[in-house]
Image (tube, rainbow, N blue to C red):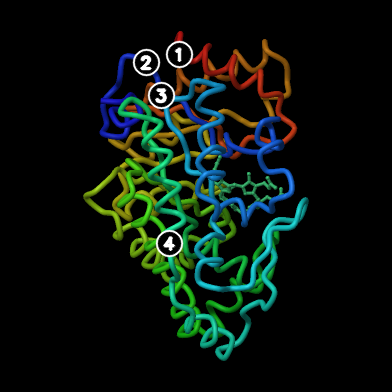
Amino acid sequence: MSSLLTALSGHRPARLPVWFMRQAGRSLPEYLEARKGTSILEACLKPELAAEITLQPVRRHGVDAAIFFSDIMTPLVLAGVDVDIQPGIGPVIAEPVRTAADVDRLVAHEAGDPSAIAEAVRLVVAELGEETPLIGFAGAPFTLAAYLVEGRGSRDHLAARAMMHADPEGWNRLLGWCADISGAFLTTQVDAGARAVQLFDSWAGSLTRADYSNYVAPHSARTLAAVEGRVPRIHFGTGTLHLLTDMAALGVEAMGIDYRTPLDEAAWLLPGIPLQGNIDPALLAAGWDALRAHAADVVDRGRAAPAHVVNLGHGVPPTTDPGVLTELVAFLHEL
Ligand code: CP3
Protein backbone atom coordinates (compact mmCIF):
# COMPACT_ATOMS: atom_id res chain seq x y z
CA MET A 1 0.00 0.00 0.00
CA SER A 2 1.19 3.57 -0.57
CA SER A 3 2.73 5.30 2.43
CA LEU A 4 -0.02 7.94 2.40
CA LEU A 5 -2.86 5.40 2.56
CA THR A 6 -1.03 3.39 5.21
CA ALA A 7 -0.70 6.49 7.41
CA LEU A 8 -4.31 7.52 6.82
CA SER A 9 -5.39 4.06 7.97
CA GLY A 10 -3.62 4.73 11.29
CA HIS A 11 -0.40 2.76 10.73
CA ARG A 12 3.18 3.92 10.42
CA PRO A 13 4.70 3.18 6.98
CA ALA A 14 8.46 2.57 6.58
CA ARG A 15 8.91 6.10 5.24
CA LEU A 16 6.99 9.22 6.25
CA PRO A 17 4.51 10.29 3.55
CA VAL A 18 4.90 13.92 2.46
CA TRP A 19 2.81 16.22 0.29
CA PHE A 20 2.17 19.97 0.34
CA MET A 21 -1.04 21.94 0.18
CA ARG A 22 -0.80 24.14 -2.94
CA GLN A 23 2.11 22.06 -4.21
CA ALA A 24 0.79 22.74 -7.72
CA GLY A 25 0.89 26.43 -8.41
CA ARG A 26 2.81 29.62 -8.69
CA SER A 27 6.01 28.45 -7.01
CA LEU A 28 6.64 26.24 -10.09
CA PRO A 29 7.96 27.83 -13.32
CA GLU A 30 6.45 24.95 -15.32
CA TYR A 31 3.06 25.85 -13.82
CA LEU A 32 3.37 29.49 -14.83
CA GLU A 33 4.36 28.36 -18.32
CA ALA A 34 1.48 25.87 -18.66
CA ARG A 35 -1.08 28.39 -17.33
CA LYS A 36 0.02 31.26 -19.61
CA GLY A 37 -3.05 32.93 -21.16
CA THR A 38 -5.55 30.76 -19.25
CA SER A 39 -7.36 31.91 -16.12
CA ILE A 40 -7.18 29.54 -13.18
CA LEU A 41 -10.87 28.64 -13.29
CA GLU A 42 -10.65 27.96 -17.05
CA ALA A 43 -7.58 25.79 -16.43
CA CYS A 44 -9.59 23.75 -13.92
CA LEU A 45 -12.07 22.83 -16.68
CA LYS A 46 -9.46 21.76 -19.25
CA PRO A 47 -8.78 18.10 -18.46
CA GLU A 48 -5.34 17.79 -20.13
CA LEU A 49 -4.10 21.02 -18.58
CA ALA A 50 -5.49 20.31 -15.11
CA ALA A 51 -3.95 16.83 -15.23
CA GLU A 52 -0.56 18.14 -16.35
CA ILE A 53 -0.49 20.77 -13.57
CA THR A 54 -1.52 18.15 -10.99
CA LEU A 55 1.41 15.94 -12.01
CA GLN A 56 4.11 18.65 -12.12
CA PRO A 57 4.94 18.72 -8.39
CA VAL A 58 4.92 14.92 -8.17
CA ARG A 59 7.53 14.68 -10.91
CA ARG A 60 9.62 17.53 -9.56
CA HIS A 61 9.56 16.98 -5.80
CA GLY A 62 8.94 13.24 -5.42
CA VAL A 63 6.04 13.85 -3.03
CA ASP A 64 3.97 10.83 -1.93
CA ALA A 65 0.62 12.11 -3.17
CA ALA A 66 -0.83 14.31 -5.83
CA ILE A 67 -3.54 16.82 -4.93
CA PHE A 68 -6.00 17.39 -7.73
CA PHE A 69 -5.46 20.75 -9.41
CA SER A 70 -8.74 22.57 -9.10
CA ASP A 71 -10.21 25.10 -6.69
CA ILE A 72 -12.86 25.15 -4.00
CA MET A 73 -14.73 27.51 -6.37
CA THR A 74 -14.92 24.94 -9.22
CA PRO A 75 -18.28 23.48 -8.10
CA LEU A 76 -19.72 27.02 -8.16
CA VAL A 77 -18.47 27.45 -11.73
CA LEU A 78 -20.00 24.10 -12.73
CA ALA A 79 -23.29 25.22 -11.18
CA GLY A 80 -23.25 28.39 -13.29
CA VAL A 81 -22.58 30.88 -10.47
CA ASP A 82 -20.72 34.00 -11.63
CA VAL A 83 -17.38 33.73 -9.82
CA ASP A 84 -13.92 34.87 -10.81
CA ILE A 85 -10.52 34.43 -9.18
CA GLN A 86 -8.64 37.71 -9.44
CA PRO A 87 -4.85 37.79 -9.12
CA GLY A 88 -3.79 39.02 -5.71
CA ILE A 89 -7.41 39.15 -4.49
CA GLY A 90 -8.77 35.63 -4.74
CA PRO A 91 -12.36 34.58 -5.41
CA VAL A 92 -14.83 37.37 -6.27
CA ILE A 93 -18.58 36.64 -6.43
CA ALA A 94 -20.43 38.90 -8.87
CA GLU A 95 -23.70 38.83 -6.90
CA PRO A 96 -23.04 38.27 -3.19
CA VAL A 97 -25.75 36.35 -1.32
CA ARG A 98 -27.22 38.58 1.40
CA THR A 99 -31.01 38.17 1.55
CA ALA A 100 -33.48 35.29 1.55
CA ALA A 101 -34.27 36.13 -2.09
CA ASP A 102 -30.54 35.87 -2.94
CA VAL A 103 -30.45 32.45 -1.28
CA ASP A 104 -33.52 31.38 -3.30
CA ARG A 105 -31.81 32.41 -6.53
CA LEU A 106 -28.60 30.63 -5.63
CA VAL A 107 -30.10 27.32 -4.55
CA ALA A 108 -32.07 27.15 -7.82
CA HIS A 109 -28.73 26.41 -9.54
CA GLU A 110 -28.17 22.72 -10.15
CA ALA A 111 -24.78 21.05 -9.68
CA GLY A 112 -23.95 21.04 -13.41
CA ASP A 113 -21.93 18.70 -15.60
CA PRO A 114 -18.80 17.33 -13.87
CA SER A 115 -17.43 15.43 -16.88
CA ALA A 116 -14.37 17.71 -17.31
CA ILE A 117 -13.41 17.03 -13.68
CA ALA A 118 -13.90 13.29 -14.03
CA GLU A 119 -11.81 13.24 -17.21
CA ALA A 120 -8.95 15.21 -15.59
CA VAL A 121 -8.93 12.84 -12.60
CA ARG A 122 -8.84 9.78 -14.90
CA LEU A 123 -5.86 11.22 -16.81
CA VAL A 124 -3.96 11.89 -13.57
CA VAL A 125 -4.67 8.48 -12.06
CA ALA A 126 -3.63 6.69 -15.27
CA GLU A 127 -0.22 8.38 -15.12
CA LEU A 128 0.33 8.10 -11.35
CA GLY A 129 -0.10 4.32 -11.10
CA GLU A 130 -0.54 2.42 -7.82
CA GLU A 131 2.19 3.86 -5.59
CA THR A 132 1.19 7.53 -5.61
CA PRO A 133 -2.43 8.21 -4.76
CA LEU A 134 -4.41 11.22 -5.92
CA ILE A 135 -6.09 13.25 -3.19
CA GLY A 136 -9.37 14.86 -4.16
CA PHE A 137 -10.72 17.84 -2.25
CA ALA A 138 -13.57 20.27 -1.77
CA GLY A 139 -14.28 23.43 0.15
CA ALA A 140 -16.36 22.98 3.29
CA PRO A 141 -19.80 24.62 3.27
CA PHE A 142 -18.81 27.44 5.65
CA THR A 143 -15.70 28.42 3.71
CA LEU A 144 -17.69 28.46 0.46
CA ALA A 145 -20.50 30.42 2.08
CA ALA A 146 -18.02 32.89 3.55
CA TYR A 147 -17.08 33.81 -0.05
CA LEU A 148 -20.66 33.72 -1.33
CA VAL A 149 -21.97 36.05 1.41
CA GLU A 150 -19.02 38.42 1.68
CA GLY A 151 -18.46 38.46 -2.09
CA ARG A 152 -14.73 37.98 -1.59
CA GLY A 153 -12.21 36.95 1.04
CA SER A 154 -12.44 38.72 4.38
CA ARG A 155 -10.76 38.54 7.74
CA ASP A 156 -13.64 38.16 10.18
CA HIS A 157 -16.47 36.98 7.91
CA LEU A 158 -18.81 39.37 9.69
CA ALA A 159 -21.59 39.29 7.08
CA ALA A 160 -21.65 35.48 7.00
CA ARG A 161 -21.59 35.21 10.78
CA ALA A 162 -24.34 37.82 11.10
CA MET A 163 -26.52 35.99 8.57
CA MET A 164 -26.50 32.70 10.49
CA HIS A 165 -28.11 34.50 13.44
CA ALA A 166 -30.32 36.94 11.54
CA ASP A 167 -31.84 34.29 9.26
CA PRO A 168 -30.99 30.78 10.44
CA GLU A 169 -33.45 29.24 7.98
CA GLY A 170 -31.89 31.02 4.97
CA TRP A 171 -28.43 30.22 6.28
CA ASN A 172 -29.24 26.53 6.55
CA ARG A 173 -30.61 26.48 3.01
CA LEU A 174 -27.46 28.21 1.78
CA LEU A 175 -25.13 25.82 3.60
CA GLY A 176 -27.22 22.82 2.60
CA TRP A 177 -26.74 23.79 -1.04
CA CYS A 178 -22.99 24.32 -0.54
CA ALA A 179 -22.79 20.95 1.22
CA ASP A 180 -24.45 19.25 -1.72
CA ILE A 181 -22.30 20.78 -4.46
CA SER A 182 -19.10 20.11 -2.50
CA GLY A 183 -20.28 16.56 -1.77
CA ALA A 184 -20.98 16.02 -5.48
CA PHE A 185 -17.52 17.38 -6.32
CA LEU A 186 -15.91 14.87 -3.93
CA THR A 187 -18.02 12.04 -5.34
CA THR A 188 -16.99 12.88 -8.90
CA GLN A 189 -13.31 12.78 -7.94
CA VAL A 190 -13.61 9.50 -6.01
CA ASP A 191 -15.68 7.85 -8.75
CA ALA A 192 -12.92 8.77 -11.23
CA GLY A 193 -10.10 7.36 -9.07
CA ALA A 194 -9.11 9.74 -6.23
CA ARG A 195 -8.06 7.54 -3.29
CA ALA A 196 -8.36 10.04 -0.42
CA VAL A 197 -10.05 13.39 0.02
CA GLN A 198 -9.45 16.53 2.01
CA LEU A 199 -12.19 18.90 3.11
CA PHE A 200 -10.86 22.46 3.40
CA ASP A 201 -12.67 24.58 5.99
CA SER A 202 -10.01 27.23 5.69
CA TRP A 203 -11.96 30.02 7.35
CA ALA A 204 -13.81 28.08 10.10
CA GLY A 205 -11.36 29.52 12.64
CA SER A 206 -13.39 32.75 12.77
CA LEU A 207 -16.37 30.89 14.27
CA THR A 208 -17.15 30.43 17.94
CA ARG A 209 -17.41 26.84 19.02
CA ALA A 210 -21.17 27.21 19.56
CA ASP A 211 -21.73 28.68 16.10
CA TYR A 212 -19.62 25.93 14.55
CA SER A 213 -21.72 23.24 16.27
CA ASN A 214 -25.09 24.82 15.59
CA TYR A 215 -24.76 26.34 12.14
CA VAL A 216 -21.84 24.68 10.38
CA ALA A 217 -20.92 21.18 11.59
CA PRO A 218 -24.11 19.40 10.35
CA HIS A 219 -23.48 20.74 6.85
CA SER A 220 -19.81 19.72 6.82
CA ALA A 221 -20.91 16.28 8.03
CA ARG A 222 -23.23 16.05 5.04
CA THR A 223 -20.42 16.85 2.59
CA LEU A 224 -18.14 14.30 4.25
CA ALA A 225 -20.90 11.67 4.22
CA ALA A 226 -20.90 11.80 0.41
CA VAL A 227 -17.75 9.64 0.32
CA GLU A 228 -17.98 7.88 3.69
CA GLY A 229 -16.63 4.33 3.65
CA ARG A 230 -15.10 4.76 0.20
CA VAL A 231 -11.83 6.65 0.86
CA PRO A 232 -10.10 8.17 3.90
CA ARG A 233 -11.20 11.73 4.62
CA ILE A 234 -8.86 14.45 5.94
CA HIS A 235 -10.42 17.54 7.54
CA PHE A 236 -8.43 20.79 7.64
CA GLY A 237 -8.96 24.35 8.79
CA THR A 238 -6.81 27.23 9.97
CA GLY A 239 -6.96 28.92 13.36
CA THR A 240 -9.17 26.05 14.52
CA LEU A 241 -7.51 24.90 17.76
CA HIS A 242 -10.79 25.60 19.60
CA LEU A 243 -12.72 23.50 17.04
CA LEU A 244 -10.41 20.52 16.53
CA THR A 245 -12.39 18.03 18.59
CA ASP A 246 -15.66 19.09 16.95
CA MET A 247 -14.15 18.89 13.47
CA ALA A 248 -12.73 15.43 14.19
CA ALA A 249 -16.05 14.29 15.67
CA LEU A 250 -17.68 14.60 12.24
CA GLY A 251 -16.29 11.14 11.64
CA VAL A 252 -13.17 11.77 9.59
CA GLU A 253 -10.22 9.42 9.24
CA ALA A 254 -7.49 12.07 9.75
CA MET A 255 -7.11 15.69 10.83
CA GLY A 256 -5.00 18.36 9.16
CA ILE A 257 -3.41 20.70 11.70
CA ASP A 258 -2.40 24.26 10.85
CA TYR A 259 1.04 25.60 11.75
CA ARG A 260 -0.15 27.32 14.95
CA THR A 261 -0.79 24.16 17.00
CA PRO A 262 2.11 21.80 17.78
CA LEU A 263 1.33 18.24 16.70
CA ASP A 264 1.92 16.76 20.16
CA GLU A 265 -0.72 19.12 21.54
CA ALA A 266 -3.10 18.18 18.72
CA ALA A 267 -2.42 14.48 19.36
CA TRP A 268 -3.37 14.95 23.00
CA LEU A 269 -6.67 16.56 21.97
CA LEU A 270 -7.36 13.97 19.26
CA PRO A 271 -6.32 10.58 20.64
CA GLY A 272 -6.11 7.77 18.10
CA ILE A 273 -6.46 9.99 15.03
CA PRO A 274 -3.76 10.21 12.32
CA LEU A 275 -2.53 13.79 11.96
CA GLN A 276 -1.36 15.74 8.94
CA GLY A 277 0.84 18.82 9.05
CA ASN A 278 2.23 21.21 10.01
CA ILE A 279 5.49 22.81 8.88
CA ASP A 280 5.14 26.58 9.12
CA PRO A 281 5.14 27.92 5.52
CA ALA A 282 7.14 30.94 6.74
CA LEU A 283 10.09 28.65 7.48
CA LEU A 284 10.38 27.80 3.76
CA ALA A 285 12.03 31.20 3.39
CA ALA A 286 14.05 31.14 6.61
CA GLY A 287 17.16 29.34 5.35
CA TRP A 288 17.98 25.65 5.26
CA ASP A 289 19.28 25.30 8.85
CA ALA A 290 16.19 26.84 10.42
CA LEU A 291 13.88 24.87 8.13
CA ARG A 292 15.60 21.55 8.79
CA ALA A 293 15.50 22.04 12.57
CA HIS A 294 11.82 23.02 12.41
CA ALA A 295 10.89 20.09 10.14
CA ALA A 296 12.68 17.63 12.44
CA ASP A 297 10.80 19.10 15.42
CA VAL A 298 7.46 18.72 13.59
CA VAL A 299 8.26 15.07 12.89
CA ASP A 300 9.28 14.48 16.53
CA ARG A 301 6.05 15.97 17.82
CA GLY A 302 4.12 13.98 15.23
CA ARG A 303 5.30 10.77 16.94
CA ALA A 304 2.64 11.46 19.58
CA ALA A 305 0.00 10.60 16.96
CA PRO A 306 -0.70 7.05 15.75
CA ALA A 307 0.42 8.08 12.26
CA HIS A 308 1.66 11.25 10.60
CA VAL A 309 1.37 12.64 7.08
CA VAL A 310 3.89 15.45 6.74
CA ASN A 311 2.57 18.61 5.13
CA LEU A 312 2.74 22.35 5.62
CA GLY A 313 0.49 24.07 8.14
CA HIS A 314 -1.14 25.95 5.21
CA GLY A 315 -0.44 26.33 1.48
CA VAL A 316 2.90 26.80 -0.27
CA PRO A 317 3.48 30.58 -0.59
CA PRO A 318 3.82 31.59 -4.27
CA THR A 319 7.26 33.11 -3.60
CA THR A 320 8.71 29.78 -2.40
CA ASP A 321 11.92 28.57 -4.06
CA PRO A 322 10.82 25.18 -5.45
CA GLY A 323 14.33 23.80 -4.84
CA VAL A 324 13.68 24.18 -1.10
CA LEU A 325 10.58 21.98 -1.35
CA THR A 326 12.47 19.27 -3.26
CA GLU A 327 15.25 19.30 -0.67
CA LEU A 328 12.70 19.23 2.17
CA VAL A 329 11.01 16.12 0.75
CA ALA A 330 14.39 14.34 0.50
CA PHE A 331 15.25 15.36 4.08
CA LEU A 332 11.91 14.11 5.43
CA HIS A 333 12.23 10.80 3.58
CA GLU A 334 15.56 10.21 5.34
CA LEU A 335 14.15 10.73 8.86
O1 CP3 B 1 -1.87 22.21 -5.15
C1 CP3 B 1 -3.01 22.27 -4.61
O2 CP3 B 1 -3.17 22.44 -3.40
C2 CP3 B 1 -4.22 22.03 -5.51
C3 CP3 B 1 -4.88 23.16 -5.98
C4 CP3 B 1 -5.71 24.09 -5.11
C5 CP3 B 1 -6.01 25.41 -5.55
N1 CP3 B 1 -6.90 25.96 -4.68
C6 CP3 B 1 -5.47 26.03 -6.76
C7 CP3 B 1 -5.28 27.49 -6.74
C8 CP3 B 1 -6.42 23.88 -3.91
C9 CP3 B 1 -6.43 22.67 -2.99
C10 CP3 B 1 -7.16 25.08 -3.66
C11 CP3 B 1 -8.08 25.24 -2.52
C12 CP3 B 1 -8.53 26.58 -2.15
N2 CP3 B 1 -8.90 27.61 -2.98
C13 CP3 B 1 -8.77 26.99 -0.82
C14 CP3 B 1 -8.56 26.12 0.39
C15 CP3 B 1 -7.13 26.00 0.73
C16 CP3 B 1 -6.55 27.18 1.45
O3 CP3 B 1 -5.62 27.79 0.87
O4 CP3 B 1 -6.96 27.47 2.56
C17 CP3 B 1 -9.22 28.32 -0.85
C18 CP3 B 1 -9.56 29.18 0.35
C19 CP3 B 1 -9.31 28.70 -2.22
C20 CP3 B 1 -9.78 29.99 -2.80
C21 CP3 B 1 -8.66 30.66 -3.51
N3 CP3 B 1 -8.27 30.31 -4.79
C22 CP3 B 1 -7.75 31.65 -3.02
C23 CP3 B 1 -7.82 32.29 -1.67
C24 CP3 B 1 -6.81 31.87 -4.04
C25 CP3 B 1 -5.57 32.76 -3.99
C26 CP3 B 1 -5.68 34.04 -4.73
C27 CP3 B 1 -4.30 34.69 -4.90
O5 CP3 B 1 -4.09 35.31 -5.96
O6 CP3 B 1 -3.42 34.55 -4.04
C28 CP3 B 1 -7.15 31.04 -5.12
C29 CP3 B 1 -6.43 30.93 -6.40
C30 CP3 B 1 -5.70 29.68 -6.59
N4 CP3 B 1 -6.22 28.42 -6.45
C31 CP3 B 1 -4.35 29.57 -7.02
C32 CP3 B 1 -4.09 28.19 -7.14
C33 CP3 B 1 -2.82 27.54 -7.62
C34 CP3 B 1 -3.41 30.73 -7.31
C35 CP3 B 1 -3.85 31.59 -8.46
C36 CP3 B 1 -3.12 31.37 -9.77
O7 CP3 B 1 -2.31 30.44 -9.91
O8 CP3 B 1 -3.40 32.17 -10.67
Q: Which mark is residue 114?
A: 4
Judging from the image, what secondary structure is the residue with disc 3 in? loop
Q: Identify residue for label 1.
A: 333
Which residue is tagged 2? 15
Mark 4 or mark 1, whichever is nearer to me: 4
Sequence-wise first label, 3 or 1: 3
Mark before the other along the chain sequence, 4 or 2: 2
Q: CA distance from mark 3 to mark 2?
A: 6 Å
Residue at 76 percent of width and 52 percent of height: 87
Mark 4 and mark 3 lie on one chain; the one further toward the N terminus is 3
Q: Are marks 3 and 1 in contact (CB under 8 Å)?
A: no
CB-based contact (under 8 Å), mark 1 and mark 2: yes
Asked if ligand 1 lies within 8 A of label 1, the reply is no
Q: Does the beta carbon at disc 2 come under 8 Å from ligand 1?
A: no
Q: Secondary structure at mark 1?
A: helix
Q: Is residue 103 left or right of residue 137?
A: right
169 and 243: which one is in front? 169
**In the visual, does 302 lie left or right of 10?**
right
In terms of image quadrants, where is residue 162?
Answer: bottom right
Q: Is residue 262 visible?
A: yes
